[in-house]
Image (spheres, rainbow, N blue to C red):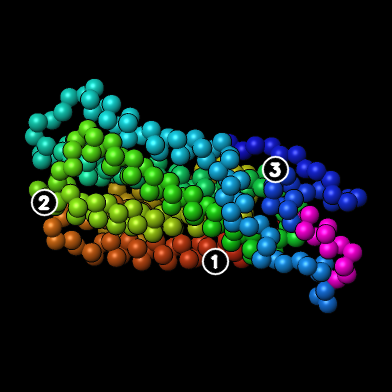
Amino acid sequence: MTEKQSPHTYGNSHAVHTDPAAIDDLTELASHEHSGHQPTGAVAGYRPGRTLRLRVELARQLRRRRTQLILGFLVLLPFILVIAFEVGQDDPDRRSGGFVDLATASAPNFVVFALVVSGSFLLPMVVALFFGDTVASEASWSSLKYLLAVPVPRHRLLRQKALASGVLALFSLALMPVVALGVGVVWYGSGEAVSPTGDAIPFSSGLLAIALAVCYLAIHLAWLAGLALLLSVSTDTPLGAVGGAVLVSILSQILNQITALGDLREFLPTHYAFAWTDLIAQDVDWTDIANGALSATIYATVFGLLAARRFTTRDITS
């Protein structure tokens, strides 16, 4: 999932990563090499705010094969679901079960079904991959210390990496529902969004509910993003960071199924994972949605602060 990148030599003894941002930064520093130093000891013309620019990091991540495969699969998934429904046998009594039985009732219902089936594993895995791979992959390539030697301030490097991962994760979360909506309109029409309880809302209200559902998912999965980022700055193995975050998510989902835990389940980060389904109703109950957003924000803040502290104090050797 990662690509080995060879370093080039700059000057007499310093190796740099082939990242275009790093090359640009070294070129800029070299141009000011003979202009003296600032009172702080930095090379004249050096600007920390111009190192590791976000657009360069995004372009670099988009060129990676793993990013292209993830986005491609998210586009392909709605078509796979349609084929599965066309090949299988449809239940004539659509309101007898959950969102699975209602998936082919309308385009909004098809989108809701796609979000439900992907919300337990696929979407969390995508978020964990973008955030867990971001710093650990640089360490696995032995290029992290060269990025810091450009020099890129540690807090800026972590922030830019997290921002790039967040943009890609948000784009991924929105991409699949948009494609599913288009596919659903073609195959199942723009009808009402129907809930398992029998509530039906107009197509326009269904679109609003889907948009709010995606926003909620982005907030809810922030806890997983923070955890994956913490693991990414704590290990030199991308697979360990990504896999560790996914395993914690799976464990939380398993514990959430144990009713004997009672109210303790409310403290699990995945307890409110599907609170967004309450949006498919005429009178929306916002209690679980608000609790889920608050819980995810607290977890994300704690993990994010721990990741920042860990990265700024860590001895970088790779």
Front tag of 1 and 3: 3
Q: Nearer the viewer, residue 196 or 41?
A: 41
In the image, residue 243 above or below residue 280: above
**Badge 3 amino acid:** Trp
Judge the density around disc 2: few (<14), some (14-19), many (≥20) Cα neighbours within 10 Å: few
Disc 3, SS: loop
Per the image, the residue denoted by label 2 is: 199
Distance of label 2 from label 1 (alpha carbons): 42 Å
Judge the density around disc 3: few (<14), some (14-19), many (≥20) Cα neighbours within 10 Å: some
Disc 2, SS: loop
Q: Position of residue 316 (x, y in %)?
A: 73, 55
* Residue 28 is covered by the magenta coloring: yes
Which residue is rendered at x = 66% and y = 57% of the image?
Answer: 52
**Badge 1 amino acid:** Leu
Per the image, the residue denoted by label 3 is: 141
Q: Which residues are magenta?
A: 26-37
Disc 1, SS: helix
* Earlier sequence position, callout 3 versus callout 2: 3
Which residue is rendered at x = 54% and y = 54% of the image?
Answer: 164
Q: Position of residue 43 (x, y in %)?
A: 82, 67
In the image, residue 207 above or below residue 82: below
Q: Nearer the viewer, residue 117 or 257?
A: 117
Left or right: where 231 falls relative to 215: right
- In the rendered view of the protein, which quadrant contains the N terminus? top right
Q: Nearer the viewer, residue 272 or 152?
A: 152
Per the image, the residue denoted by label 1 is: 305
Distance of label 1 from label 3 (alpha carbons): 25 Å
Q: Position of residue 187 (x, y in %)?
A: 22, 32
